Amino acid sequence: MISVPNSLERAATLLNTAERVVVFTGAGVSRESGIPTFRDVDGVWSRYPADQFATPAGLLATWNDGPERVAEFLLEALEPLISAEPNAGHHAIAALDAHCDVVVVTQNIDGLHSAAGSRTVYEVHGTTYRVVTGEGEPLARLTRDDLRGVARRLRHILATGVTEARILAALRKLLGFNRSGMYRPNVVLFGEALCEPDWSFAQEAAEHCDVMVTVGTSEAVYPAAMLPASARNRGTPVIRIDPVGDPEDSESIWLEGTAAEMMPALAARAFGESGP
Ligand code: OAD
C-alpha cells in the first residue's frame, strides 16, 4: 500500500469539497519552466539588486551610471521568458477549472497560466506582453516574436557596443514616447500601484474563496502577500506548495515539493487526475 502524507490527504479533501478556490502564485511556479525566482540563492535579485533594478528611482540611477547594466538586466529577464513553456504545475492548476470555480492570482509577468489554459487569471504585477501609457492605460499587446526581437537587438548591442541611443532603439516596442506621451511595459516596480482592475478583482475573489492554494511564493512582497495573510486571518484554509517551509507553521497546510511535483499530486489526490 502506498502511504499518502497526512498533509496531502487533508489538502486534497479541502480542495475536493471547495466551490471557490483562489490559486495565488509566485516565481516558484515557473521555476521548472526555466524562469529563475527572485529570492532564492541563484535568484534574480542576487545578481541585480532590487533597489538598483526594480524601483523607478533605482533603475534611473543605474541607467545614469551606465546603461550597459540595464541592458544586461533586461536581456537576462527576457531570455528565459521568451523560451518558457507551462510546466506540469501550470497545467495542473488549469485543469482545476473542470472541478470548481478557480481564480488564479499571479505575481508573475510571464503569461504562463493563460498559456496553460487557466480561464480566469489576474496578473497583479502586470505582464511583459502588454505596453501601457504613463498613466497605466493599455496601449498594445506584444507577441512572443516582438519580445524575441527586443532580446535579439539587445544581444547584438551588448556584443557590438552599448550607447543610450542604441538601447532605446532596441527597446522601442516596449518603451518610448509617442504622440500621446510616454509608453512602457505593464510591469509593476517596487513602490508602484498594483495593476487594476486585476488587483481589485483578486481581493474580491480572495475574500470569498473557500480554500486558497499558494504555489511558489515567498509571500515577501506586499500588498500582494496580503491575500494569503488575510485568508489565514479570516480562517480560510491555506494550502502552501513550496520546497521550502516551516514544519512548525500551523497556519498553512504545507506540501513540501516543487510546483511540477506537488500540484499534479494534489489534483490527482483531490480529483483522481493530474492534468490535461
Ligand atoms: P520569490 O523569489 O520571493 O520566492 C520564490 C518562492 O518559490 C520561494 O518560496 C521558493 O522556495 C519557491 N520555489 C523555488 N523553486 C520552486 C519550485 N520549483 N516550485 C515551487 N516553489 C519553488 O518570488 P515571489 O514570491 O514570486 O515583484 O516574489 C514576489 C515578488 O517579488 C515578485 O512578483 C517580484 C519580486 O520582487 C516585483 O518585482 C514587484
Image (tube, rainbow, N blue to C red):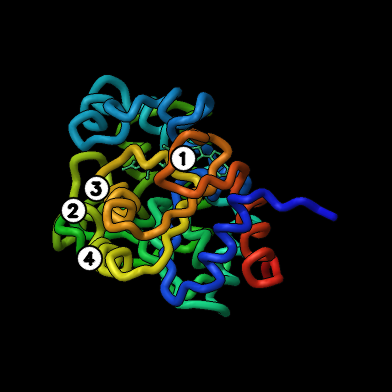
Q: Amino acid at mark 3?
A: Pro
Which of these two is toward me, 132 or 151?
132
**Vertically, is 74 above or below 269?**
above
- Going from N to C along the chain, the mark reached first, 4 or 1, is 1
Which residue is labeled 3 in the image? 223
Q: Is residue 140 left or right of residue 156?
A: left
Q: Amino acid at mark 4?
A: Ser
Which residue is labeled 1 in the image? 77
Q: CA distance from mark 2 to mark 3?
A: 26 Å
Q: Amino acid at mark 1?
A: Ala
What secondary structure is found at the residue carrying circle 2?
strand
Which residue is labeled 2 in the image? 182
Q: Residue 62: image x %, image y %?
A: 27, 25
- Going from N to C along the chain, the mark reached first, 2 or 1, is 1
- Going from N to C along the chain, the mark reached first, 2 or 3, is 2
Does residue 115 show up?
Answer: no
Q: Residue 72: image x %, image y %?
A: 44, 30
- Going from N to C along the chain, the mark reached first, 2 or 4, is 2
At x 50% / y 67%, what residue is drawn? 114
Circles 4 and 3: CB atoms closer than 8 Å = no
**Vertically, is 160 above or below 266?**
above
Q: Residue 164: image x %, image y %?
A: 30, 32
Label 3, residues with CA under 10 Å away: few <14, some 14-19, many ≥20? few
Q: Residue 261: image x %, image y %?
A: 67, 50
Does residue 166 show up?
Answer: yes
Q: CA distance from mark 3 to mark 1?
A: 23 Å
Q: CA distance from mark 4 to mark 1?
A: 27 Å
What secondary structure is found at the residue carrying circle 4?
helix
What secondary structure is found at the residue carrying circle 3?
loop
Q: Amino acid at mark 2?
A: Met
For label 1, being within 8 Å of ligand 1 is answered no
